[in-house]
Amino acid sequence: MSQWYAVQTNPRCEARAAASIMFPTYLPRRRQVRIHHRTKAEIEREYALLTGYLFVALPSPGHVGFVRGCDGVKRVLEVQGAPLPIPASIVERLHDQEFRGHYDDVWVRRKSVLDAIKPVYRKDDMVEVVRGVFAGKNGVIARMINPNRAIVEVEGLCGLLAQLQVPIDELAIAA
């Protein structure tokens, strides 16, 4: 069974080192979206998550010498002269989180754009609750607690008015 080891690469040579090593490698990456200053186009790029490092799966520690001689490799991380094995669980966790976009700046930016277009509610606006126990009920905004939550008066059981504290994501303008 293979064991993972961390490899330090020459500056900006992570991809070159991964291509020259003849064993399975893993180069954790993150994506970032930037806005071009002139054209305002979104530019999505990938960068190494651990700048200057990648992981290599070796069948035995004896293969470390081969890895050291590969193009773009600076050294294999060692402790007291012996290569430092990296637990597979750490590499798997990094891979899983990368796959889920945990390290990406893409979603953070897109979420902030969505936040910017949230509807702004004011006191006495007619709204409809779209999620939760009172879904489908119309009501009136009594007051805003903060930009993300409101107190809404809706008709509850037996025709009584109930005041609900509702996130504005669960509201829509009443038709």
Image (cartoon, helix red, strand yellow):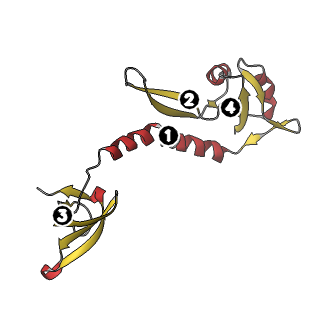
Name the foreground residue: 105 vs 50: 105
Residue 156 appears left or right of 61: left
Q: CA distance from mark 2 to mark 4?
A: 12 Å
Q: CA distance from mark 3 to mark 2?
A: 49 Å
Residues at discs 1 and 4 in contact (Cβ within 8 Å): no
Q: Secondary structure at mark 2?
A: strand
**Where is residue 27 shown, x and y percent of the image?**
61, 31
Q: Which residue is mark 4?
A: 53
Tag in front: 3 or 2: 3
**Where is residue 141 shown, x and y percent of the image?**
22, 65
Instruction: Point out which mark residue 99 bears.
Output: 1
Residues at discs 2 and 4 in contact (Cβ within 8 Å): no
Tag in front: 1 or 3: 3
Q: Which residue is mark 3?
A: 124
Q: Earlier in the sequence, mark 1 or mark 3?
A: 1
Kindly identify the amino acid type of the residue bearing the numbered disc 4: Tyr
Residue 95 appears left or right of 7: left
As drawn, 157 above or below 25: below
**Where is residue 20 shown, x and y percent of the image?**
67, 19
Report the residue at 65% width, 22% height from top.
12
Q: Give the class, few, some or many, for how many residues have Cα within 10 Å of label 2's Cα (few <14, many ≥20).
A: some
Instruction: Point out which mark residue 47 bears.
Output: 2
Tag in front: 1 or 2: 2
Check the image and name the residue furthest to the right: 80
Q: Earlier in the sequence, mark 1 or mark 2?
A: 2
Tag in front: 4 or 3: 3
Name the foreground residue: 153 vs 78: 153
Check the image and name the residue furthest to the top: 71
